[in-house]
Image (cartoon, helix red, strand yellow):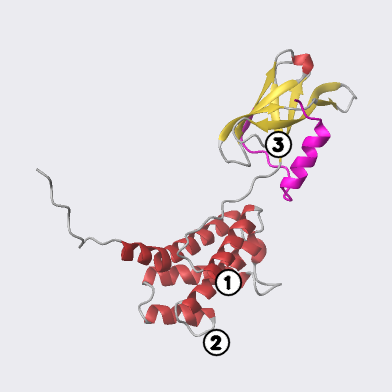
Amino acid sequence: MRRALAEVLELLACETSLWKNWSTDMEATLLGNPQENKFSLSGTCPHCARATVFMTVTSVNTEPILNPHNQVTGFRLLAGMQCQGCKRYILGIVKRDAQHQSRCEHVEYYPLGKPNDDISLEIPADIAADFKEAIRCQWIEAFKASVSMCGRALEAGCINLGADPDMKIREQIDWLASQGKITAPLKDMAHKIRLGRNRGAHPPSDGLEDITTDDADLLLEFTHDFFQHVYVMPKKLESLDLKRKAKTPTS
């Protein structure tokens, strides 16, 4: 049974609190008679993260697009749509050209999905919580918050590895290196994270307005690699037992 547009909008509002224009890769296709304005979208589902096709499950709301001379140049089409994989809903918006009636272009859709903040279980829970928050901040383009949370997670990791909580984070990193708990490359990596964190902790002359998405991406990558080396890899090495007896081959 086809749902009313208002009902689908209510379902979407209950499922997410992060709404914004997010024009990611989607392909729009007009279906049937162009005058009926029915369309489909194909792309990645923000709910199940799988490649899928979205089909309209509501009536299509049609709004004319006018030029400065008040002439209709196209139509903005809006409809509730359903993922054919997970059966959850999005609100799809496309644009149809008035002259080339078979031409349809994706504009945007809602809701914004959610970041993949899954990290290794070997990382202690309190440190993991800070790092997961850094990932979520980066995903909504809150770069200042992201680099600050990377630094907070790093400091918690230094303390967990035995550094004195009363030390400054710079001293904690150097102490870990002096004790052989981290390698020289990890020490350099940690100092990069520290510097990024410091830029977020000392306004107004911290230069934080210069933090870009590339900066935040790199600091997230460094933080991830740091924890992989000090927590994840040692656990994996412990679980690898190459000394166990090989099975006796059967004849």
Q: Rate crowding at label 2 as few (under 14), some (14 to 19) or many (20 or more) other CA atoms within 10 Å.
A: few
Cα–Cα gap, marks 2 and 3: 50 Å
Classify mark 3: residues with Cα within 10 Å, few (<14), some (14-19) or many (20+): many
Q: Residue furthest left?
A: 251
CA gap, disc 2 and disc 1: 14 Å
The residues colored magenta run 1-27
Q: 63 or 198: nearer the eye?
A: 63
Which disc, if any, is residue 44?
A: none
Q: Residue at x 65, y 63 (%)?
A: 144
- At 13% from the left and 51% from the top, the residue drawn is 248
Residue at x-position 54% and y-position 65%: 128
Q: CA distance from mark 1 to mark 3?
A: 36 Å
Residue beneath label 3, please? 90
175 horizontally vs 247: left or right: right
Q: Quadrant of residue 238?
A: bottom left
Q: Disc 1 designates what residue?
A: 152
Foreground pick, 236 / 146: 236
Residue 54: image x %, image y %?
65, 29
Instruction: Give whichever of discs 1 and 3 has the lower sequence position.
Output: 3
Q: Amino acid at mark 3?
A: Ile
How far across and down, in percent of the image, does residue 112 sit? 68, 44
Q: How many marks?
A: 3
Residue 5 picture location, percent across and down: 81, 32
